[in-house]
């Protein structure tokens, strides 16, 4: 048996050796050889005839091969991506591999770099699929765009766009607050005197209308068009789109303003009693209630970038809040008078405020520095920023829209203006539409503001044209991707950073969270001894023996160190003394 | 001893038993008895066991030379060999030698040591055996994704020839087609090798690569040797050695050059060019003059040392040779050139041409900025600017001309005209310097004039501007007071009287710069100032198309009074500053006071411990890191750490990373579909290991993974196999092959 095996082995070896010496195979060579071996007679018979032909054919074949080899893509490789687009999708800085790095580290970094580069490239490539661009109103020479009236615009544009300029005359229950749903299809208006209505404003279908028979301070859509919250005189109510009261949340009283954080499913409310409260809409639980200690809170905005709530106060300060901290993250002094209104831009870079001192200020809230300010006659009672960065300000009964506010240079004149009949109470841009909704004393006005809305929407995030089924699907996905309220903070990228707190700090936090110190030493408990040795006196004696033992150790150590140090000092001084000795000292006894 | 006694007793019993049975073998019994008796007395001899039956294992201790009485000698055994005729002489000789040699054989190693050695050898063997797997295992560890079972057949569409391996050409049409194809040596499948295949064909085998590497190594080693040698020779300090070497080199070079002239004139020409180049370089650098370190030292030595003098002279000679001009010019001309060179610096030192023609302050020299005309103060700035430009042009032209002239002189000065030209140049210089002096004098006046002019202009402008604002205000009517700039809260008070004429605004640049500058000072007072400045930062008024009708006169007054009321009581800014200072104080660590009253001094009610003691026992804590809002006077940023996020964060740096920056950069790209395209998400979240449902994952087989390079090619792109007799070799499944091998090995 063994012999057979060895034979087999040697056989394979020989074969291998033979194979090694063979030149690499070509298709045609082999086919030729096999052909010859197979059909020698046929070849011979046809040899004479084919000779000329074959040469010709060989030539043609050669040419063909060469051609096919030479024929190359004039634009080889992938299509280049413009640098600007790539820049747009750049996420953080690249990490350089250190010189003396481990192989494993090198691999890990290289892999992640290649991945992120790939992702960036792909995203930049797919950016091509966002072709829509926003345009703006342009006047003739010597014509200010702000003198063009809404009627003129509505006449000039197509019918569907023209129909977006409309007035709702609701003089009985005004002034009105309003809110657009996240997709921009539905509008919710709430009159001060209790009138609440939700409308599909594009089709002008009335979904529900009611009077809550109480003062209405604010209205807000929740995550879908199916539910909305109304801050009434005492409590917070939640209704569905049919107008059926779903909840009366009595924990939330005297609410003046509300903000909904869509990715956290949190409804943040600011009350007249100075409380900022967070309601988790998905589970119906109060997440946090913070006493701001700053009095009545009637100015509120959210930063869509990091879900931080901004509150404006009567002493001219603006405070930034997260549900995780009982004190403001940041407190800024913005106005000499009280803050009347504030708004934050979509990217979370700029904040625009207006105060009783009739100033309009633009802040960079990454650096908390004022960029510029301008003086508005009569001040601005309401502010709103559109998705494309147009600022609308309500001054008395006039709505002014400003362009390029967020740049470094202050604005001199408005881009558009529109006069209404009553005092303006609410301002909101409709998402993905060039429409500004205005709630005022005489009802509601929808105003056309060219270039206000974002033309490209993310259909997976908020799709204005979604169907019922899509909405359901989106709701499930959104709930699955819900961000926990603990992650709200000034820096939304905090999670991707390594926690570098010291051990002591962490320990302190742990102790605070648990209410006891898990690492604390147990107190000495003397063992119970028999035969009368566990009398109270004996136990006390034993306790005394152990007590302060640790402290004694410490003291012993310090004493030892001190003695050593002294010794050293002495030696040094001795040496010095020795140096100072004169030659004659040796004769001294 | 006890054992012996037992044995004895056994023997005795045996004897008694045998006595009872038979008396025939008395002798044997007797002998035994004798033995027993003899064994009783004296030292006990070792008992020899008698071998009674054949066995495979024979202990060396049991062999005894009983019967002969003597030991067996080698000669006894070899005696027969000598006599046998068949044995060769060589063996006989060897045996004889063996016989004569007295040396005893060494003892075999003891068991432990032999085992140790064996273990060592076995270890080496197995390591070599196992280390074969190292590569493949590393590869698998590094792989982004592993699909089990390994060595699967690819699910991708297979080639036609693989599918039709067993297919025969049957119909005449098919036969005809294939004959044609093969007759023209036409490749049956795609005619051109794919680039991958080409590469694989071109690629080196492992052996080749090894050879190549070895070659490269050798070359590198040789190079390094050579370099080392060169270095060594270079370090040799002996001058004689170098001299000789240099001489030899020169000789060699000359020889080569002569040969080159004969054999390769082109090469020789090139060499000549090189020489020429070196000469030019020398001319440019003037290396061999007496300015070098070596030359200077030699110059000092030259007084006393003959050889040094010689060396210097040699060097000078070299310099002369190298710096020789090809077209030999006269000496005086050389001088003239030098003279001219000396005059050059005046122009060289002139400031560079003006970059910003409009801004006179941007220029390096002020001499040419102010024209005489500008002394009239009522002139416009623009006019002055134009004049400036004109003058600049003039100066530029002048300079250009001068440079041109100079260049001309340098290039082609005939030797006769040398004197006058130099004079001209000198004159020129004098003129220029005169002019400059004059202009310098002018300049001072002009500057002052310009300053006054500028100031006047500015005041005029501001006046105009204010006038404009006045006009506009007039035009817009009385209701436009809202546009009046209000910088301070104090100004609000003035608002009542204000209808026209507001104080002129200062240039905004200085204003905006002020708060930043002041904010950096840590003093509280200064900060207060800065804060007010920040808040009262100048705001630009906005023109509004519609005038607010809601806010009419009375309402405005009302509003103002409301504001006044609102700010009567509270000072917002000071409140804020207090708040901030409180926060800062809270952040500062407290001083720990460990003073105990009564120790070392009197204690009691109303007695304070002494100052010395308080100082001694008060422990200062380290100051906290600087606050984030240190430089932002109107902002308080909370320094509290948010512990809520911390529980979700990574707290320990994962293994291969050395610092947090590295790790953070690797997780900076999100992997979710919200931020990425579908394909990217898939590739980013693909599992590390994929297993097929129900498939048996067998351990790796050596033959499949560790194969010699030579067997690798050929697996790719097999030709089409036709006919029943030629079965496809490559077409067989790899798994099948493996299983066959397994069977073999099991058998």
Image (cartoon, coloured by chain):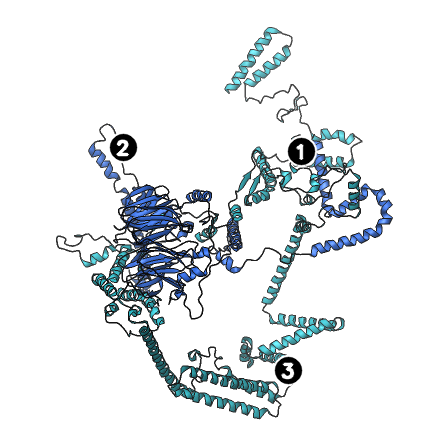
Chain colours: A blue, B cyan
Q: Which residue is mark 3?
A: B325
- The residue positioned 42% from the left and 69% from the top of the image is A143
Which chain does the numbered disc 3 sit on?
B
Residue B241 percent location from the top left of the image: 63, 70
Which callout, 3 or 1, points at the residue further toward the start of the chain? 3
Q: Which residue is mark 2?
A: A527
Residue B8: quarter of image:
top right
Residue B51 percent location from the top left of the image: 64, 20
Query: Which residue is more in the foreground, A521 or A322?
Result: A322
Judge left or right: residue A55 versus residue B595: right
Q: CA distance from mark 3 to mark 2?
A: 110 Å
Question: Disc 3 vs disc 1: which is toward the camera?
Answer: 1
Question: Disc 1 vs disc 2: which is toward the camera?
Answer: 1
State the SS at label 1.
helix
Residue B471: quarter of image:
bottom left
**CB under 8 Å between discs 1 and 2:** no
State the SS at label 2.
loop
State the SS at label 3.
loop
Question: In the drawing, what numbered circle is on residue B740?
Answer: 1
Q: CA distance from mark 3 to mark 1?
A: 88 Å
Question: Disc 3 vs disc 2: which is toward the camera?
Answer: 3
Which chain does the numbered disc 2 sit on?
A
Judge left or right: residue A585 versus residue B181: left
Same chain, labels 1 and 2: no
Q: Is residue B92 above or below residue A325?
A: above
Which chain does the numbered disc 1 sit on?
B
Query: Which residue is more in the foreground, B12 or A578?
Result: A578
């Amino acid at each position: 048996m063994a012999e057979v095996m060895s034979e087999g082995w040697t056989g394979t070896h020989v074969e291998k050796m033979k194979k090694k010496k063979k030149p690499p195979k070509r298709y045609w060579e082999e086919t030729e050889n096999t052909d010859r071996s197979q059909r020698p007679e046929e070849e011979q018979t046809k040899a004479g005839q084919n000779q000329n032909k074959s040469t010709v054919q060989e030539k043609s074949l050669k040419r063909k091969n060469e051609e096919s080899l030479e024929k190359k893509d004039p634009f080889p490789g992938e299509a280049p991506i413009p640098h600007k687009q790539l820049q747009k999708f750049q996420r953080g800085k690249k990490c350089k591999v250190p010189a003396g790095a481990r192989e494993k580290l090198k691999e890990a970094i290289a892999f992640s770099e290649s991945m992120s580069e790939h992702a960036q490239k792909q995203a930049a490539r797919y950016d091509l699929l966002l072709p829509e661009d926003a345009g703006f109103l342009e006047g003739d020479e010597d014509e200010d765009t702000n003198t063009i009236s809404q009627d003129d615009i509505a006449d000039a544009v197509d019918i569907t766009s023209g129909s977006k300029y409309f007035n709702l005359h609701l003089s009985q229950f005004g002034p009105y607050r309003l809110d657009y749903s996240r997709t921009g299809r539905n509008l919710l208006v709430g009159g001060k005197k209790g009138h609440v209505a939700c409308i599909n404003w594009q089709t002008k279908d009335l979904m529900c209308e009611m009077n809550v028979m109480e003062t209405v301070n604010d209205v807000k859509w929740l995550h879908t068009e199916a539910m909305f919250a109304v801050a009434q005189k005492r409590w917070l109510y939640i209704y569905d789109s049919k107008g059926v009261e779903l909840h009366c949340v009595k924990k939330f009283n005297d609410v003046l303003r509300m903000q909904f954080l869509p990715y956290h499913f949190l409804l943040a409310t600011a009350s007249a009693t100075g409380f900022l409260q967070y309601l988790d809409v998905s589970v119906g639980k109060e997440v946090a209630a913070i006493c701001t200690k700053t009095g009545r809170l009637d100015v509120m905005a959210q930063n869509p970038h990091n879900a931080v709530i901004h509150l404006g106060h009567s002493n001219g300060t603006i405070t930034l809040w997260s549900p995780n901290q009982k004190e403001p993250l940041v407190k800024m002094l913005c106005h000499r008078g009280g803050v009347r209104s504030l708004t934050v831009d979509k990217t979370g870079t700029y904040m625009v405020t207006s105060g009783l001192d009739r100033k309009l200020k633009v802040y960079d809230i990454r650096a908390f520095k004022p960029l510029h300010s301008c003086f508005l006659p009569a001040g601005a009672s309401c502010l709103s920023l559109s998705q494309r960065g147009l600022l609308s300000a309500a001054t008395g009964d006039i709505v002014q829209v400003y362009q390029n506010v967020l740049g470094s240079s202050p604005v001199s004149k408005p881009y558009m203006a529109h006069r209404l009949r009553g005092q303006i109470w609410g301002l909101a841009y409709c998402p993905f539409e060039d429409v500004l909704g205005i709630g005022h004393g005489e009802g509601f006005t929808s105003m056309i503001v060219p270039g206000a809305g974002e033309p490209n929407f993310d259909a997976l995030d908020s799709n204005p044209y979604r169907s019922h089924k899509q909405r359901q699907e989106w709701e499930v996905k959104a709930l699955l991707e819900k961000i926990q309220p603990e992650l709200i903070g000034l820096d939304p990228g905090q999670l991707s950073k390594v926690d570098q707190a010291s051990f002591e700090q962490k320990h302190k936090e742990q102790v605070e969270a648990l209410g006891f110190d898990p690492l604390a030493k147990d107190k000495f408990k003397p063992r119970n001894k028999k035969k009368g040795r566990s009398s109270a006196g004996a136990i006390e004696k034993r306790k005394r023996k152990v007590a302060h033992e640790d402290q004694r150790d410490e003291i012993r150590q310090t004493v030892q160190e001190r003695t050593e140090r002294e010794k050293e000092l002495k030696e040094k001084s001795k040496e010095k003394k020795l140096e100072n000795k004169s030659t004659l000292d040796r004769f001294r006894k | 001893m006890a054992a012996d006694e037992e044995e004895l007793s056994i023997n005795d019993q045996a004897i008694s038993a045998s006595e009872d049975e038979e008396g025939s073998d008395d002798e044997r019994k007797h002998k035994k008895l004798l033995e027993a008796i003899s064994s009783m007395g004296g030292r006990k001899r070792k008992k020899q066991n008698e071998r009674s039956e054949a066995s495979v294992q024979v202990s060396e201790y049991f062999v005894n030379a009983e019967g002969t009485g003597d030991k067996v000698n080698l000669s006894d055994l070899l005696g027969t060999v000598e006599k046998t005729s068949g044995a060769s002489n060589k063996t006989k000789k060897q045996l004889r030698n063996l016989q004569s040699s007295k040396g005893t054989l060494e003892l075999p190693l003891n068991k432990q040591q032999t085992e140790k050695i064996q273990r060592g050898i076995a270890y080496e063997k197995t390591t070599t055996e196992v280390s074969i797997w190292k590569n493949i295992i590393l590869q698998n560890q590094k792989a982004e994704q592993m699909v089990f079972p390994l060595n699967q057949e690819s699910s991708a569409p297979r080639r036609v020839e693989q599918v039709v391996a067993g297919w025969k050409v049957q119909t005449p049409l098919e036969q005809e087609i294939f004959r044609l194809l093969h007759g023209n040596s036409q490749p049956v499948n795609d005619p051109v090798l794919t680039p991958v295949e080409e590469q694989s064909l071109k690629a080196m085998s492992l052996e080749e690569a090894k050879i190549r590497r070895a070659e490269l190594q050798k070359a590198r080693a040789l190079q390094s040797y050579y370099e080392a040698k060169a270095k060594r020779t270079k370090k040799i300090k002996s001058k004689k050695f170098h001299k000789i070497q240099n001489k030899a080199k020169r000789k060699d070079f000359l020889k080569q050059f002569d040969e080159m002239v004969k054999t390769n004139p082109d090469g020789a020409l090139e060499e000549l060019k090189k020489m020429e180049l070196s000469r030019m370089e020398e001319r440019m650098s003037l290396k061999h003059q007496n300015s070098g370190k070596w030359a200077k030292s030699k110059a000092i030595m030259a007084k006393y040392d003959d050889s040094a003098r010689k060396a210097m002279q040699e060097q000078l000679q070299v310099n002369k040779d190298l710096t020789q001009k090809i077209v030999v010019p006269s000496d005086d001309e050389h001088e003239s050139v030098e003279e001219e060179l000396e005059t050059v610096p005046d122009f060289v030192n002139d400031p560079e041409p003006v970059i910003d023609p409009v801004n006179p302050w941007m220029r390096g020299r002020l001499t040419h900025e102010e024209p005489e005309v500008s002394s009239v103060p009522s002139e416009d700035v623009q006019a002055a600017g134009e004049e400036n430009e004109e003058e600049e042009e003039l100066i530029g032209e002048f300079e250009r001309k001068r440079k041109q002239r100079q260049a001309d002189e340098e290039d082609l000065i005939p030797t006769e005209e040398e004197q006058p030209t130099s004079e001209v140049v000198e004159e020129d210089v004098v003129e220029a310097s005169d002019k400059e002096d004059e202009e310098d004098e002018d300049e001072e006046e002009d500057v002052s004039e310009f300053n006054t002019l500028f100031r006047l202009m500015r005041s005029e402008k501001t006046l105009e501007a204010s006038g404009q604002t006045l006009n506009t205000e007039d035009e817009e009517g009385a209701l436009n007071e809202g546009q009046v700039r209000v910088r301070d809260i104090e100004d609000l008070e003035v608002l009542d009287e204000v209808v026209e004429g507001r104080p002129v605004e200062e240039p905004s640049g200085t204003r905006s710069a002020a708060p930043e500058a002041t904010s950096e000072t840590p003093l509280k007072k200064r900060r207060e100032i800065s804060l007010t400045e920040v808040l009262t930062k100048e705001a630009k008024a906005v023109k509004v198309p519609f005038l607010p009708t809601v806010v009419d006169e009375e309402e405005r007054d009302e509003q103002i009074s409301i504001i006044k009321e609102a700010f009567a009581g509270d000072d917002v800014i000071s409140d804020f500053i207090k708040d901030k200072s409180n926060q800062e104080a809270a952040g500062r660590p407290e001083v720990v006071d460990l003073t105990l009253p009564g120790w070392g001094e009197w204690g009691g009610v109303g007695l304070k411990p002494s100052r010395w003691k308080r100082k001694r026992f008060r422990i200062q804590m380290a100051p906290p890191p600087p606050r984030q809002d240190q430089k932002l006077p109107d902002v308080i940023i909370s320094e509290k750490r948010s512990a809520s996020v911390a529980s979700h964060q990574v707290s320990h740096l994962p293994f291969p990373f050395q610092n947090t920056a590295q790790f953070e950069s690797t997780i900076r790209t999100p992997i979710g579909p919200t931020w990425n395209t579908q394909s990217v998400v898939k590739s980013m979240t693909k599992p590390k290991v994929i297993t097929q449902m129900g498939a048996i994952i067998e351990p790796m087989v050596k033959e499949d993974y560790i194969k010699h390079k030579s067997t690798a090619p050929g697996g790719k792109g097999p030709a089409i196999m036709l006919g029943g007799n030629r079965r496809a070799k490559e077409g067989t499944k790899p798994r099948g092959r493996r299983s066959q091998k397994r069977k073999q090995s099991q058998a």
